[in-house]
Image (cartoon, rainbow, N blue to C red):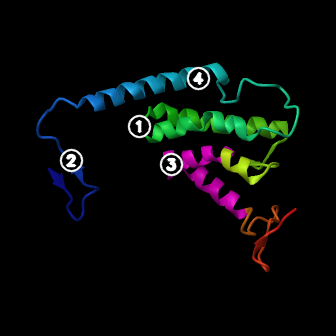
Amino acid sequence: MISSHRHELPAYVRASERVVPPQWALQEQTLFETLNKAAKEFVERYTHPDGTLIWFEHWPGMDGSDDPYEGFMNLALLYVIGGSSELHEISRKIWDGITWQWTEYGQIHREFDGYYDWMHHGEGYLYLYFLGLAGPSTLKDRHRAMKFAGMYTGDDPEALNYDKELKLIRSH
């Protein structure tokens, strides 16, 4: 029975009979259980409890800051498609840990990659997009998105990337 009165919260569905779930649904649940377990083992093996990676104390160059994000971005995506709610929290902690860690290495500035080309930026920031899918009302993510956009709209006085008069992104 579906109900949606004018002044009620969103509609709801009430089951009136029990049925045996189809085999594909049972297999899907087994797959999610397996992926949740694998994700937890992966995180325990490659990260510290604070979300930073088990990695070098000092990074030797200015290459590869997209790679750590790429290794963990699918935790948020797995949560979005039906994985454990614990993955949402873990994926956020790891995003923060990687961002802090690579800031210490000197590659991330103001939570944004200070080097590299747009292809690599896009690869690294898929993680941020998946966090947005996982928690679209998360204030911190909305602020990050606005801050990153401001770097290319001329609204950020520290990032002179956009020329409002000529309406173009500068090439440095």
Q: Position of residue 166 (x, y in %)?
A: 79, 79
The residue where tag 4 is placed is 42
- Please name whichever residue, 92 or 75, is drawn nearer the observer in this view of the structure: 75
Q: Would you say the residues marked 2 and 1 are in contact, meaning their CB atoms lie under 8 Å apart?
A: no
Name which residue lies at 41% across and 29% down. Answer: 32
- Please name whichever residue, 162 or 21, is drawn nearer the observer in this view of the structure: 21
The residue where tag 2 is placed is 13
Residue 157 location, quadrant = bottom right
Could you tell me which secondary element the residue under label 2 belongs to? strand
Sort mark 1 into few (<14), some (14-19) or many (20+) by Cα contacts within 10 Å.
Answer: few
The residue where tag 3 is placed is 133
Name which residue lies at 84% across and 31% down. Answer: 59
Drawn side of residue 68 relative to residue 19, left or right:
right
How far apart are labels 2 and 4 at the CA level?
37 Å
Residue type indicated by callout 2: Val
Residue 67 location, quadrant = top right
How far apart are labels 2 and 1 at the CA level?
19 Å
Q: Earlier in the sequence, mark 3 or mark 4?
A: 4
Q: Would you say the residues marked 2 and 3 are in contact, meaning their CB atoms lie under 8 Å apart?
A: no
Residue 128 appears in the picture as rendered: yes
Residue 61 among magenta residues: no
